[in-house]
Image (cartoon, rainbow, N blue to C red):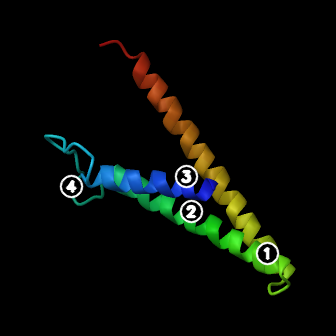
């Protein structure tokens, strides 16, 4: 269920970053010369994180069924844990930046 929620966020970020359906196209989109927009990078990273978490979940299920070794299950769970910790750290930084911007005087 949580992976579905993260997946929907990834989809929204992807459509917002590319001006997809439901997103109002801004008059001028800041795109670095020769670079990728931040929204696309964030969407790509989050989709990779969802993939890692889904892989770990599938590996854990095969481990419970006895079709996967304990070592593979542990490695997959540790990779998922590291991915989740990274996602939480990025989220915390984004929230802190948003709060800082909202405190700026106009």
What residue is at 22 percent from the left and 45 percent from the top? 30
Residue 63 is situated, as x and y percent measured from the top left of the image, at 82, 79
At 80% from the left and 84% from the top, the residue drawn is 68
Distance Cα–Cα, label 4 vs label 3: 33 Å
Q: Quadrant of residue 70?
A: bottom right
Q: Which mark is residue 53?
A: none
Question: Going from the N terminus, do you reach mark 4 or mark 2 first?
Answer: 4
Name the residue carrying label 3. 5
Mark 3: which secondary structure?
Answer: helix
* Mark 4 or 3, closer to the camera: 3
Gap between marks 1 and 3 measured at Cα: 24 Å
Q: Earlier in the sequence, mark 2 or mark 3?
A: 3
First in sequence, mark 1 or 2: give its number. Answer: 2
Give the residue pinned by disc 1: 73
Residue corresponding to mark 4 = 33
Point out residue 19 in the picture as x, y percentages from the top left corner.
24, 51
> 102 above or below 22?
above
Numbered mark located on residue 50 in the image: 2
């Amino acid at each position: 269920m949580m992976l579905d929620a993260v997946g929907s966020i990834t989809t929204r970020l992807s459509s917002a970053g590319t001006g997809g359906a439901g997103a109002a196209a801004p008059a001028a989109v800041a795109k670095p010369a020769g670079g990728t927009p931040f929204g696309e990078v964030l969407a790509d990273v989050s989709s990779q994180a969802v993939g890692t978490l889904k892989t770990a979940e599938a590996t854990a299920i095969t481990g419970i069924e006895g079709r996967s070794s304990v070592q593979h299950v542990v490695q997959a769970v540790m990779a998922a844990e590291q991915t989740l910790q990274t996602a939480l750290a990025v989220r915390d930084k984004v929230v802190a930046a948003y709060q800082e911007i909202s405190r700026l005087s106009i």
